[in-house]
Every structure is written in structure tokens, then in C-alpha cells.
Image: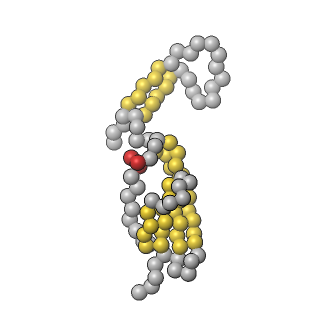
């Protein structure tokens, strides 16, 4: 039987992997342990001879309620008093 490559999974800039396992693998990433916002999954593969490959996958977590705002857009130039309508609703699929 051939030696298998090892996979190391990292989130963002964490120095310690969240998982280490031989390839191929099925893995469930629990996003409830992450704060809402942008993150990066870094996968490092190391073959039996020590050569490494790296793949970065950016993603966004949104476990909390979705926030909608009416009356102000991103990067808008504004002045004076702004009437805003803000709502937060937990999305379910």
C-alpha cells in the first residue's frame, strides 16, 4: 500500500491546524465556532517525501441575524440628518 499525503487544515492565520488527516478525507467545517465575517480556509498537503502544496479558500460566515439597512449604502457620501431603517432577522434555509 502506498503512503498517503497528509492534509493540514487551518483557519485564518492560526498557527495550529484545526485538523490533520490522511488524504482523501471528508470533513465537516463547523462555522458556529467562527465569528461572522470573512475567513480563509488554508489547506496544506504534504506528500510522503515532504513536498507541500497549499490552497487558500476565502469564505464568509453569517451565522447571526442578517442585518438590512435602508437609507444608507456602502461608500455613500452623505451630509445632514439621515433617516435609517434597520432590521435584523435570523435567516433559515
* Res. 21 image quadrant: bottom left
Q: Is residue 31 above or below residue 70?
A: below
Total number of numbered discs in the rendering = 0
Name the outermost residue toward the front. 16
Q: Is residue 11 above or below residue 92?
A: below
- Between 17 and 88, the one lying in front of the other is 17
Give the quarter of the figure containing the C terminus.
Answer: top left
Rendered residue at 52%/15% (across/down)? 83
Q: Position of residue 10 (x, y in %)?
A: 50, 59
Q: Work out whether residue 57 can be spotted.
A: no
The color scheme shown is secondary structure
Name the outermost residue toward the top. 81
Q: Position of residue 58 (x, y in %)?
A: 54, 52
- Between 7 and 17, the one lying in front of the other is 17
Q: Work out whether residue 74 can be spotted.
A: yes
* Res. 88 image quadrant: top left
Rendered residue at 46%/41% (across/down)? 36
Q: Position of residue 68 (x, y in %)?
A: 46, 28
Q: Is residue 65 above or below residue 24?
A: above
Name the outermost residue toward the bottom. 1
Give the quarter of the figure containing the N terminus.
Answer: bottom left
Rendered residue at 36%/34% (across/down)? 90
Instruction: Judge left or right: residue 89 versus residue 78.
Output: left
Rendered residue at 65%/16% (across/down)? 79
Q: Position of residue 7 (x, y in %)?
A: 48, 69
Amino acid at each position: 500500500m502506498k503512503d498517503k499525503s497528509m492534509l493540514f487544515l487551518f483557519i485564518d492565520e492560526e498557527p495550529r491546524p484545526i485538523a490533520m488527516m490522511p488524504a482523501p478525507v471528508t470533513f465537516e467545517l463547523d462555522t458556529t465556532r467562527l465569528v461572522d465575517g470573512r475567513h480563509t480556509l488554508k489547506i496544506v498537503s504534504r506528500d510522503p517525501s515532504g513536498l507541500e502544496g497549499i490552497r487558500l479558500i476565502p469564505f464568509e460566515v453569517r451565522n447571526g441575524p442578517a442585518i438590512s439597512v435602508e437609507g444608507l449604502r456602502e461608500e455613500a457620501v452623505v451630509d445632514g440628518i439621515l433617516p435609517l431603517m434597520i432590521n435584523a432577522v435570523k435567516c433559515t434555509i
